[in-house]
Amino acid sequence: MSWLPLAILAAPLAVAVFLLFFGRRLHHGGDGFATGVMALCFAGSLVVAADVLAGGAGREILGHSVTWMTIGGMNDGSSGSLPGFVLTLGVYLDPLAAIMLCIVTGLALAVMVYTRWYLHGDNLYPRFWWSFSFFCFAMIGVVISSNLLMSFVFWELVGLGSYLLIGFWYFKPAVADDPHYQAMKASYATGILESKLSPADAQLKAFVMNRIGDAGFIAGIALTAWAVIAWHGKHGTPAGDPLAWSAIFKAVEHGAFNEISLLGLSGTNLLTLAGLGIFCGAVGKSAQFPLHTWLPDAMQGPTTGSAIIHAATMVAAGVFLVARVHPMLTPDALLVVACIGAVTALLAATMACVQWDLKAVLAYSTISQLGFMLVGLGSGVASGGYNAGIAHLFTHAIFKCLLFLCAAAVIHACHGHQSLTRVGGLGRKMPVTAFAMGVAVLAILGVPGFSAFFSKDAILVAAQVAGHHGSEHYGWVALVPAVLATLAAALTCYYMARLWWRLFVAPAADSHVVDHAHDPWPSAKLVLIVLALGCLQAVWTLQANPFAVEGAWLDHVIRAKSVGLYASGVEVDHDAIHHAHGGVVSLAITFAAVGIALAWTVFVLLPRRGLNLAERCRTTPPLSWVWALLSRLWFLEYVYDFVFVRILGKGLGRTLAEGDLGTPQRLAALDAATATKKTARFGYSLDGLIDGVAKAFTLPGRAGNLLHSGRIGTYVALAIGVVAVISLLRL
Amino acid sequence: MNEILRLGPDHLAGYLAVAACLFAIGVVACITRRNAVGFLMGVELMFNAAGLNAVAYARFRDAHVAGDGQILALFLIVLAAAEAAVALALVFSVYRSFRDIDLDQTTRLNGTAGSDPAPTVPEAHA
Amino acid sequence: MLTTSAALPVWFVLLPLLGAGLIVLAPAMRVRVTALGVALATALVAGLAAVLAGIHGGHAMQFETNIPLIPAWGFSFHLGVDGLSAAMLALCGVIEVIAVLSSWKVDKRPRAYFALLMLLFAGTNAVFVSLDLLLFYVGWELMLIPMYILIAVWGGDQRRYAAVKYVLFTLVGSLAMLFALILLPASVPEEGVLVEVDPDRVMTEAHIGPTSLEWYPPSAFSHPVVGNGLLWVKNKTGFPSMNLKRNDLPVDIYGLPLLIERNRSFTPVQVVHLKLEELKFRGRKKFGDHPPSMSQFAGDSKNDNLDLKASKFFVLVPRDLNIQHLQLLWPHWAKTTFLGVSVAVLGFWCFLLAFAVKVPVIGLHTWLPHAHVQAPTAISVVLAALLLKLGVYGFLRIAWPVFPTAALDAGPLIAVLGTVAILYAAWVALMQNDLKRLVAYSSVSHMGFCLLGLAAVNVAGATGAVVQMVTHGLGSAMLFLVVGVIYERAHHRRVDGFGGLAKPMPVFAGIALFACLASAALPGLAGFPGELLVFLGAVSSTAANGKVQILGLVSCLGVIITAAYLLWMVKRVFFGPIRHPEQAAWPDLTRREYACLVPLVLLTLAVGVWPQPLIDSITPAAETLVRHLHWVAATR
């Protein structure tokens, strides 16, 4: 069965290539074909996972690997020479990858089934299938990759898949240019959709912001490769693939980074730098602060595409990568990871509270939950954070996908309207959707019995434990992740509850749009039900008692693997976890209850009594200031646009361009200038300087020209003068 | 005074000075005169100055061949006349082309850019 | 017939020349077909040579042709193909065919156009295969005038300015190269110079085993021992050490004084000069095909123990223009001076100037935007894909090997220039409104990676630089063809004059996106291996005390801006609503445009997914260069 992972990888690519060329001729764009292949992939991944997981905890499978590039080197051990090495592409499966593979293929299958209903009738329908299949191919590649470089390769391909899907309706103008939309929106509607981005803009923004993270990722890869290769060179061993997971961890463990130095950094500091470089990529891909602004704009793509990409898998790839390189992250790096995750979680949660666009709420919720995962991973193995982060990765994938699919159902039912200002009261008309979404909301709230109760609380516990441990060394900074994450959890309860109450219970502001709302097709309904089942806690823990601290099946599977340097021999600190568990659980339940009640009060109860509390808060200071700040996304978009796009991008570019080749006026006047004596002055530029140098060489010629006046008298004078000079000189 | 400055009919310097003045006048006349005939007058002056020089040297220095300075002066007179004839013929030809004998107008050989149209790269004809 | 001694490079150079003649004589209806035929034949020759050279691999020169032309100058018609040239040959073959195909529509004086194009190809091809410095220079100059005429007659509306600028810029560099070309042989005494060669290289390339000495005739060595044999000093144990001073050797071989340059202390006993002809004449055993064994030179039994690894090897390098000979003379350049300046430094900077104009290096690059914008599409393709590579090729073939001391000293500067090129050109490209100028600056930016890879002085970096040369050739050719397609329909190139072209031309939009992603180094496409290897090489480089490493890390930012300007251009031109209604009626790609673009697309995919053949052919050359530089750094 060792070919099975490769088959799972290759099948979506084959489907994508086939549908790219022949999709249009197939019935319905080949959707059945694509879905069928994905079903087979899912089945295959279940088989693979069973194989991996059945082999006992901690089983790793190193599958086929092919040498991609062989780079020469000097194996003579002389100073400064590096040995040759290879770069491979291979399969590596451990429980983490196996479960992730199942989730990716399973959710892809679910989304594909759902999309047959959702995009039915769209004339770009065939394009979705090959774009989506290509994306799945890339994501599977990230999951099963056996080395850091292969992760990067498929990482970028995932970015391409996302680019294609965000820009699905590439011809659509920005909403600012759409008069119909402008006429229909509510007066206070501000937020992501009010930005000037069309799908084409959004896809560009996503790709470039991901590239910012990738620049750091490449730097981290290069540093790591250097360390490993140099270590091998010093010890005379063949370098092999320096970026394979085992090679990296072994080299790090044996002090590879201690033997090199850069910019005065060496040892742990350099390792931290490399780890943070790799983490940069995760910041970009997982939309963490400060590279989070592309994700809400990515909602310009089809909602089902967003369900898998910007909820469940692609953005999870960043977290997956951090989990993979976890052994090489030093405590310093882990603290940075946790802090950034916590800041992001809180930031996004605050912004989600005031969003009126259905998809925007979910987008910010995704960013926030990814921050949670990074808090978990950043808390380290000892506090149980590693397991918690990974668990939340899995549970979040399911319930977030479900949330997005329900949102898609709502949008479809309301003929494309997706704003909470207009739709509402759909509970009666779309019971299945309401039920499924309710389950998902309960999950994300962390209500006992649902999946995130298990994972999110484990993260909060881990953050607390890690904070206590770390405060000896790092002071108050170590407590930041725990505090911010707890606050974010509280806000999460509020805004998710708000979403559900407003969508399904509170009456619609514009009843016309919800008149014909109904549940989706039976196949789509089935998808919703199945995913709702995945939101139950028991599925992940295989325990009847939701309050049990340990013994969860998922924990057991992920935990027992011993992971390299910083976690090798590091055991989970059960006592501390037990200690913190009770407090966190009660806090979480309180948050959930308060959140549900508060949202119900503000958005259902009081409006029935005629009191629109939300409107009052929006308009009266000081809460109106808070609302303005949050609905303008903490002004980050403006700052980024001003600093990075206008000044650092276009401004600097224009300055350099005009300094290089000159202003457009100069360029337009160039050929005329060669014909006449006078050079037009249009500012200074490098090209102008060179032209000036060239013209300076004509000066002696021009000086000589003065002698050629054509007048005989001048020539006579010249002759006499020369003779006089010669005679004088001779004397 | 004549003894001190050694100018005067008994010394060479005076005749050389006169010849130099004449030559200078001729040069200035060549350089500055616009009229072609005036130019030629300057040329004549220069010739005669040279002849005067020759005669003066013949008078005051021992000659290699007796009377060589005077013979040179006679040669110069004849040459000047011949040159004047040729030059005047040229002036006639110039007049026929330019309709003018103002030397400031006959400057077609001026080398500074702008008086000629710029050379063009040949267009490839279809 | 296709042995390693086949004269494939000769055909590679001569075919375009003959083609030019054929085109001049061809009937008017058949001009284009003749040109295409010649280009295909050249491509076939190039492909064969590249594949065979790549397969044979190794460090040796394949298909070597050496015909002395002017022995007094040391000038010979010396061509050869090694891994580096093989990569360039393959690229030339492809690009030349594509260029002819994309020139099909030229209707102004096509005969002259195609004849000049063939001359251009001849010059380019000559540069890539020549192993003689003067031949290199002749090829270099041969490219100049046809390019000038092609731009000046068939170009855009500022063509005269652009053509003159291009010619003058290149000529300044060429003059410097001419000066160095004359300086180098003039600095070598007539009897030649005795230089030490890297024992590792001799041992690996000369196939001398550590315990047995088998003497092979000189032609087996990839570095030249032309006619003068290999002089080495045997090293033995158990004998007292001696200081060898100048002219102070125990044995004076056949009256030839040895010119040992430095005092070296080692333990020789006997100096053996295997001067092949003399030995023959002196009636020793005839050599024929049997390599002699060492024992016939052994005087006594003590000579049976040879320790070759500790020996020193010297070669008497004659005075000529052979590039490989000049490489061996590197210690000599460092010692000779011309007007007070070391010849090594002077020569290096002269060649650097010549090649820096072509690369182009920032500061000397302003001819490029003008030349690219004004040139017709096919000429832009040739300029970007081939001519820019000549500069880096010159670095690799001449400047670095022949002047390694000066090259190592100039390493940080080259790295800075490379990083600046990557970032500066990308930023400038961001704000260009003319499509062709944008792509021209992207070319400058990508060549910066080659410079950075060279400055890293390790095999990964050097390999990456050459891979980047090849893949950038493919990528920029595609981009310029894409721009050409647009220009043919719109007759202008302003980016803000388009919008939403993906609707009427979906296939073209897909190919344009593909080309931009390839240029932006998306993994799986051709642009990625080169950039990856350059990054890996730069960050792991030990040159210049870590400066190159820092520059490598800084240049990682380049990927951001590259993606930004390329994809922003794609968005403005292809996505969004259609801004000019008349553009909605434009036809998608014609068959000819398909024929130009599809091969490049397939090649880009192939090289991106499976770059190993390319890397395999380049690695030996890169390893040789880097080993040379390391040895120089160790022994200077």
Image (cartoon, rainbow, N blue to C red):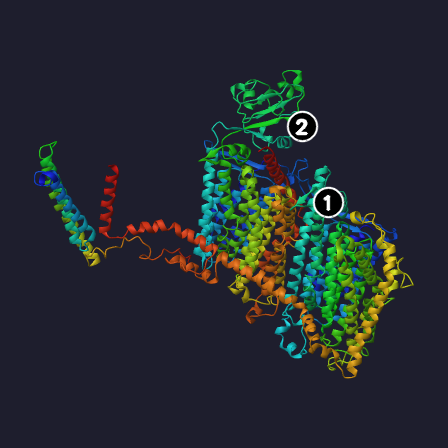
Q: CA distance from mark 2 to mark 1?
A: 31 Å
Q: Chain of mark 2?
A: C
Give residue A285's quadrant in the image.
bottom right
Furthest-left residue in this view: B9
Residue position for label 2: C209
Q: Which residue is painted at 67% across and 55% down in the image?
A: A214
The answer to whether A651 is drawn above or below residue B1 in the figure is: below
Q: Horizontal and vertical percent for residue A379? A: 79, 56
Relative side of A496 to C426, left or right: right
Residue C620 falls in image quadrant: top right
Q: Looking at the rendered structure, which numbered label has been put on residue A241?
A: 1
Q: From the viewer's perspective, is C507 left or right of A470?
A: left
Badge 2 marks a residue whose secondary structure is loop
- Counting from the top left corner in percent of width and height, residue C623 is at 63, 39
* Vertical position of residue A112 compared to residue C465: above or below: below
Residue C412 screen position, x and y as percent: 57, 44
